[in-house]
């Protein structure tokens, strides 16, 4: 737990730095936009050609955004490691059946869409059809999210949430129960 606490604290520090760096990038972009507006509004050809400060501000913004992106990736990796090594810190996840795990895995690895028709909904992960029942369970447990930004008449995009990715990493699908021996006996009796 000691190492995880250190990693977690480090990740939080990186997130704080990222917020600060992103703010500095936004300031540089605001200055660049102001310089652009001034140059475009000017009647003087010299003002329009003097874009060196604009280029400098864009380079500053680019550097801040690259630093922020690197810090975010590093923080996400540190937090993933903490969640993987400390089960007590994980959110409560449902135990997935084999069908639910397979559906979640297909959604995670393929471009997935949900289309509503008069006879019901169709869910496709790439060329694979996802059955409604496991899909509904995954949605109920917030392991997937449906984009409501698109038109309700067209296909809606489906993505795996952070909790869904965590469930894929830490769980293995449960196996269906073995066939009951009584069923085998009744089949043998019918053959006689």
Image (tube, grey):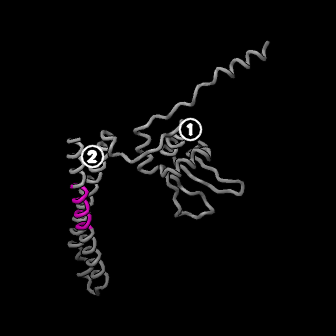
Residue 160's spot in the image, x, y percent? 47, 49
Task: Work out which residue is located at the far bottom of the displayed protein and give it.
Answer: 43
Circle 2 residue: 78
Left or right of 97 in this view: 63: left
Tell me: residue 9, above or below residue 192. below
| Quarter of the image that includes the N terminus | top left
In the image, residue 186 lies in the stretch drawn in magenta: no
The 10 Å Cα crowd at callout 2, few under 14, some 14 to 19, many 20 or more, is: many
Q: Residue at x 57, y 44 (%)?
A: 134
Q: Residue at x 44, y 45 (%)?
A: 93
Q: How many marks?
A: 2
Tell me: residue 70, above or below residue 153. above
Query: Which of 48/114 is in front?
Result: 114
Q: Secondary structure at mark 1?
A: helix
Query: Which of 142/55 is in front?
Result: 142
Residue stretch rendered in magenta on the structure: 13-25
Residue 191 location, quadrant: top right
Residue 111's spot in the image, x, y percent? 52, 48
Residue 57 location, quadrant: bottom left
In the image, residue 21 lies in the stretch drawn in magenta: yes
Query: Which of 57/192 is in front?
Result: 192
Tell me: residue 190, above or below residue 2. above
Q: Secondary structure at mark 2?
A: helix
> Which mark is on residue 99?
1
């Amino acid at each position: 737990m000691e190492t995880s606490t250190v990693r977690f604290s480090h990740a939080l520090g990186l997130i704080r730095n990222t917020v600060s760096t992103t703010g500095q990038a936004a300031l540089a972009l605001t200055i660049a936009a102001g310089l652009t507006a001034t140059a475009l509004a000017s009647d003087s050809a010299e003002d329009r050609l003097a874009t060196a400060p604009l280029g400098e501000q864009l380079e500053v913004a680019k550097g801040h955004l690259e630093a922020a992106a690197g810090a975010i990736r590093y923080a996400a990796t540190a937090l993933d490691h903490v969640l993987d090594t400390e089960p007590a810190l994980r959110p409560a996840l449902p135990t997935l059946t084999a069908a639910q795990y397979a559906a979640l895995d297909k959604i995670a690895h393929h471009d997935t869409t949900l289309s509503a028709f008069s006879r019901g909904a169709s869910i496709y992960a790439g060329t694979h059809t996802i059955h409604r029942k496991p899909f509904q369970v995954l949605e109920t447990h917030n392991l997937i999210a449906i984009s409501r930004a698109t038109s309700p008449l067209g296909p809606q995009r489906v993505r795996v949430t952070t909790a869904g990715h965590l469930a894929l990493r830490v769980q293995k699908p449960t196996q269906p129960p073995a066939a009951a021996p009584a069923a085998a006996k009744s089949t043998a009796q019918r053959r006689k």
